């Protein structure tokens, strides 16, 4: 998958909120130390590991591929890579308005660790909060 294809998938997946990443941003992030990409047809996840902490930077599933378990599969692949890199804690941020993602993350054992007020810009010009969520990767994770 090219960086431009990643950007196009990301744009379809987020419908403007949060702002989708550009191809140049994908390139810059993935050229950084400790980053990785996992992808399946219709979706991708980007992670980064620093010391013993891993972060899910983005998880995107194109609308035409939703409700097929791709988000769960991508999250599981991301978590497996984080564990291979010996991460002790996994983090992510998610909009408080993204109920489907919140349900997915909670089903994987993520719990609220903090809140960032007004973190995400919305397409309508408003802002919405992000939840910072964390989990210990030793917890039970669904199989791919």
Image (cartoon, grey):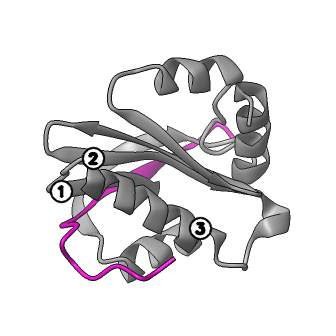
Can you identify the residue that label 1 sits on? 89
* First in residue order: circle 1 vs circle 3: 3
Residue 119 image offset from top left, x and y in percent: 42, 40
Residue 76 image offset from top left, x and y in percent: 45, 68
The residue drawn where x is 59% and y is 67% is 71
- In this rendering, the count of numbered labels is 3
Pick the residue in front: 108 or 78: 78
Left or right, residue 30 beside residue 106? right
Residue 42 image offset from top left, x and y in percent: 76, 57
Instruction: Give the magenta range.
Output: 124-144
Q: Quadrant of residue 142?
A: bottom left
Asked if residue 120 is positioned above or below residue 77 in the image, the reply reads: above
Pick the residue in front: 86 or 14: 86
Left or right, residue 72 beside residue 7? left
Instruction: Tell me the element at label 2.
Output: strand
The residue drawn where x is 72% and y is 79% is 67
């Amino acid at each position: 998958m090219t960086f431009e294809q990643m950007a196009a998938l990301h744009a379809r997946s987020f419908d403007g909120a949060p702002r989708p990443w550009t191809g140049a941003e994908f390139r810059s992030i993935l050229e950084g130390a400790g980053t990785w990409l996992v992808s399946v047809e219709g979706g991708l996840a980007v992670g980064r590991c620093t010391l013993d902490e891993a972060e899910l930077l983005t998880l995107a599933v194109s609308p035409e591929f939703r409700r097929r378990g791709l988000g769960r599969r991508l999250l599981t692949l991301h978590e497996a890579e984080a564990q291979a890199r010996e991460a002790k804690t996994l983090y992510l941020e998610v909009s408080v308005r993204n109920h489907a993602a919140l349900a997915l993350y909670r089903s994987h054992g993520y719990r609220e660790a903090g809140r960032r007020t007004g973190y995400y810009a919305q397409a309508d010009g408003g802002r919405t909060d992000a939840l910072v969520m964390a989990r210990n990767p030793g917890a039970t994770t669904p199989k791919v």
